[in-house]
Image (cartoon, rainbow, N blue to C red):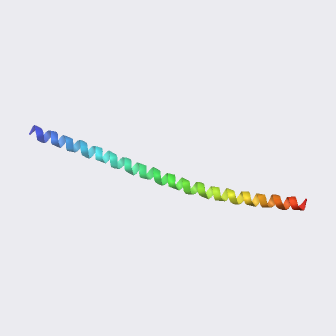
Amino acid sequence: KKFEDQLKELVKEHESKQKQCEDQVKELESKQKQCNGRVVELVSKEKDYEGRLKELESREKKLGEQM
């Protein structure tokens, strides 16, 4: 009887720890998705800034030619 009780307690502890691990995995996966989304956003902004820079360089060149 005592052995059964100890075994049940160990099983409960194991299930509890397993659930904690599963919850942590879900949280980490969620954070990874957020990070991936930010990377995509930053890459998009970088391309936008590169486009603006090229446009400004082009305008600068035209103004230099006009002078």
Compared to residue 31, the image places residue 67 above or below, namely below
52 sits left or right of 38 in the view: right
Dividing the picture into quarters, in which one does residue 44 lie? bottom right
47 sits left or right of 37 in the view: right
Q: Report x, y in % for residue 57.
A: 77, 58
Q: Residue at point 27% right, 44% down?
A: 16
Q: Residue at point 63% right, 56% down?
A: 45
Q: Please identify the quadrant where the C terminus is shown.
A: bottom right
Q: Residue at point 51% right, 52% down?
A: 35
Q: Residue at point 70% right, 60% down?
A: 51
In this view, the residue farthest toward the right is 67
In this view, the residue farthest toward the top is 2
Q: Report x, y in % for residue 59.
A: 80, 60
23 sits left or right of 16 in the view: right
Q: How many marks?
A: 0
Compared to residue 55, the image places residue 25 above or below, namely above
Q: Please identify the quadrant where the N terminus is shown.
A: top left
